[in-house]
Image: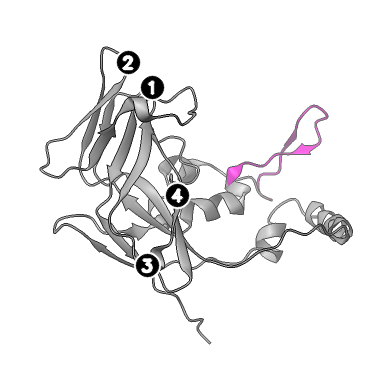
């Protein structure tokens, strides 16, 4: 029996804008190029020489993060330049207003040292709607440290409809050049609002010990074959 799916609804507030797309459509080429270790390529290394070699291509949770939910992309080509005072300038030729620059003095947010102090916002033209009781995480595309910007994270109660809005971001200090139209800029992940209670459970230690034995009995794919559940976004 096919499981009922929730509807994640959107509309673009502009006739020629690219629609919201599936996050799994934006798996980066660098990830595709990584060759996973497996039973046809078993290698050991480390200080003792008996540490099994794996990489992120063997990590299902990493891929789950890349492909979770939906993606909003940049509306137009953007060109980033450095100003004489080491701040950033963003230019475009479209009549749209895809980006705004907030007062740099108003930015009191601690940032990683590799980002410019300019406080930019994506002028989001996407209207979102989730079923009653569902909110959405809006965040930087997961695990995409190759992108020359950092989109900040927010949670929006999208069952009340998200009408456009500004999403903050920062540009890397050493970046100058093109951010092409269609670049993923905001990953959107709907989730159900539920109440949770924090509780210590020492019985988990025994459960974890049993699980650790099972996991380490196989070189590869125990999690994928025995624990993983498919996440379905259409």
Cα–Cα span, label 4 and label 1? 23 Å
Q: Secondary structure at mark 3?
A: helix
Question: Is residue 229 rendered to the left or right of residue 90?
Answer: right
- Labels 4 and 3: the sequence-earlier one: 4
Q: Position of residue 135 (x, y in %)?
A: 46, 63
Image position of 172 with respect to 134: above or below: above
Q: Secondary structure at mark 2?
A: loop
- Residue at (26% x, 59% y) in the render: 19
Cα–Cα span, label 3 and label 2? 40 Å
Q: Is residue 45 magenta?
A: yes
Q: Nearer the viewer, mark 4 or mark 3?
A: 3
Q: Position of residue 23 (x, y in %)?
A: 41, 56
Cα–Cα span, label 4 and label 3? 15 Å
- Labels 2 and 1: the sequence-earlier one: 2
Depth check: 99 or 32 in front? Answer: 99
Q: Nearer the viewer, mark 1 or mark 3?
A: 3
Q: Which residues are magenta?
A: 39-56
Q: Secondary structure at mark 4?
A: strand
Image position of 224 with respect to 76: above or below: below
Where is mark 4, residue-wise? 154
Where is mark 2, residue-wise? 86
Cα–Cα span, label 2 and label 4? 28 Å
Image quadrant occupied by the C terminus: bottom left
Observer able to see residue 56: yes
Q: Nearer the viewer, mark 3 or mark 2?
A: 3
Decide whether the magenta segment is chiefly helix, strand or loop.
loop
Where is mark 3, residue-wise? 160
- Labels 4 and 1: the sequence-earlier one: 4
Q: Nearer the viewer, mark 2 or mark 1?
A: 2
Q: Quadrant of residue 86?
A: top left
Image position of 130 with respect to 27: above or below: below
Q: Secondary structure at mark 1?
A: loop
């Amino acid at each position: 029996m096919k499981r009922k799916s929730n509807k994640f609804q959107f509309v673009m507030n502009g006739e020629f804008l690219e629609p919201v797309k599936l996050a799994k459509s934006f798996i980066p080429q660098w990830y595709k190029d990584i060759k996973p270790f497996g039973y046809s390529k078993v290698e050991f290394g480390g200080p003792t020489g008996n540490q099994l070699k794996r990489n992120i291509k063997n990590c299902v949770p990493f891929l789950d993060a890349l492909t979770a939910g939906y993606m909003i992309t940049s509306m137009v080509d953007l060109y980033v330049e450095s100003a004489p005072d080491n701040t950033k300038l963003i230019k475009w030729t479209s009549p749209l207003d895809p980006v705004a620059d907030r007062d740099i003095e108003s930015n009191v947010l601690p940032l990683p040292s590799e980002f410019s102090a300019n406080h930019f916002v994506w002028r989001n033209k996407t209207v979102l709607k989730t079923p009653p009781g569902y909110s959405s995480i809006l965040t930087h595309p997961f695990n995409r440290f190759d992108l020359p910007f950092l989109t900040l994270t927010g949670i929006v109660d999208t069952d009340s409809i998200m009408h456009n809005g500004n999403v903050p971001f920062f540009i890397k200090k050493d970046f100058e050049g093109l951010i092409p139209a269609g670049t993923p800029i905001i990953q959107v992940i709907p989730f159900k609002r539920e109440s949770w209670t924090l509780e210590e459970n020492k019985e988990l230690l025994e459960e974890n010990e049993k699980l650790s034995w099972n996991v380490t009995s196989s070189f590869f794919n125990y999690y994928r074959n025995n624990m993983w559940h498919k996440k379905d976004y259409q």
